[in-house]
Image: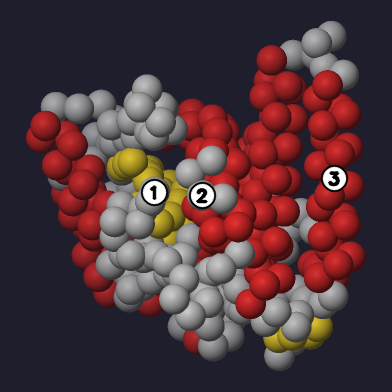
Amino acid sequence: MTSNSEKRIKTLELWAAKMRRNVVDVCMQRGGYAGQGVALSDFGACLYFDEMRPDGKGWYHDRFVNSNGHDTIINFAAMAEMGIYTMEELRTMGADGSPIDQSPIEGARGFEITSGSLGTGVSQAAGIALGERKRGTDKRIYCLLSDGELHEGSVWEAFMFAAHHKLSNFMIVIDNNDLGATGKTSDVLAVEPVKEKLEAFGFHARQINGNSIPEILDAFAEAKTIKDKPYGLVADTKIFAGIKVYRDAIPFAHFVGANGRWDTGYLEWKPGWQEIQDTIRKLEVELAAMP
């Protein structure tokens, strides 16, 4: 007999696979941050399709701030599945005159802030969390940031602010992939041990495999039990996790061009596209067989 948890996880695996398909579809057009988008699809699926509460008006009661512009392709990938954007719109990302920016601005559908000014999103998200508490709401505020953003001093100021105000409605998720625009985060400026540093700054912190849906769900559940502290999740992710042919071809890539090239390797888009389509079909069959 299939348990509710098994079906829940399988459903989220399917959402994540569809998000990966959307990421690849967009990046095949003019290039993009495909590795990050593919890797973060597990987190995005759990957040958008399980964790955040609907507001009954076509959006969410809770609020999500994506600080890192490189990662906002997961917002678009999820919102395409929700019908907020069409794939036809998203395929124009980065084109001259397109309203779809690789680093979206405040006011774009589904975005709380202007993403991509690295290090500023956490401060804004912490302010939103304090504001919601002062209003007396039960909204939870989620903020995604990259490990590279930990190089910014404003991030640590925001951590102190969140801990000082005991923002238990505030959860940060660090995409800990050891990747920056100019090389490995650990080579440019080491940030580890991240979990211990968050604890020292007054967070309740946890480190997980960021490509494990059960671990992500467990962390979300734990965060809601923590009182008088913000919650810091260090999610260890791997570039292109979930599409093996891409992961094997380019295990380290900040940006992949439409021609599939990056200075650490080259990938052909078509095999990975076929792999994720096969994964989706397999998951749909498995899910349909569950009671």
Q: Nearer the viewer, residue 231 or 275?
A: 275
Residue indicated by mark 2: 85
Q: Say whether residue 269 is left or right of residue 87.
A: right
Compare residues 120 and 289 and report the one nearer the observer.
Answer: 289
Q: Position of residue 176 (x, y in %)?
A: 55, 63
Residue beneath disc 1:
110
Q: Amino acid at mark 3?
A: Thr
* Circle 2 residues within 10 Å: few <14, some 14–19, many ≥20: some
Question: Is residue 55 toward the left or the right of residue 208 in the image?
Answer: left
- Nearest to N terminus: mark 3 or mark 1: 1
Q: Secondary structure at mark 1?
A: loop
Dot 2: element: loop
For the C terminus, the image quarter is top right
- Please tell me whether mark 3 or mark 2 is closer to you in this view: 2
Residue mark closest to the camera, 3 vs 1 = 1
Determine the CA span between mark 3 and mark 2: 23 Å
Compared to residue 46, the image places residue 44 above or below, namely below
The residue nearer to you, when weighing 215 against 272, is 272
- Say whether residue 72 is left or right of residue 157: right
Calculate the distance from the C-alpha at mark 1 to the C-alpha at mark 2: 10 Å
Q: Is residue 207 visible?
A: no
Mark 3 element type: helix
Residue identified by numbered label 3:
279
Precedes in sequence: disc 3 or disc 2: 2
The tag earlier along the polypeptide, 1 or 2, is: 2
For image coordinates 81% across by 42% down, the residue present is 280
The number of numbered discs placed on residues in the rendered structure image is: 3
Q: Relative to 17, is 39 above or below?
A: below
Is residue 267 visible to the viewer in this orientation of the structure?
yes
Q: Residue at x 88, y 57 (%)?
A: 274
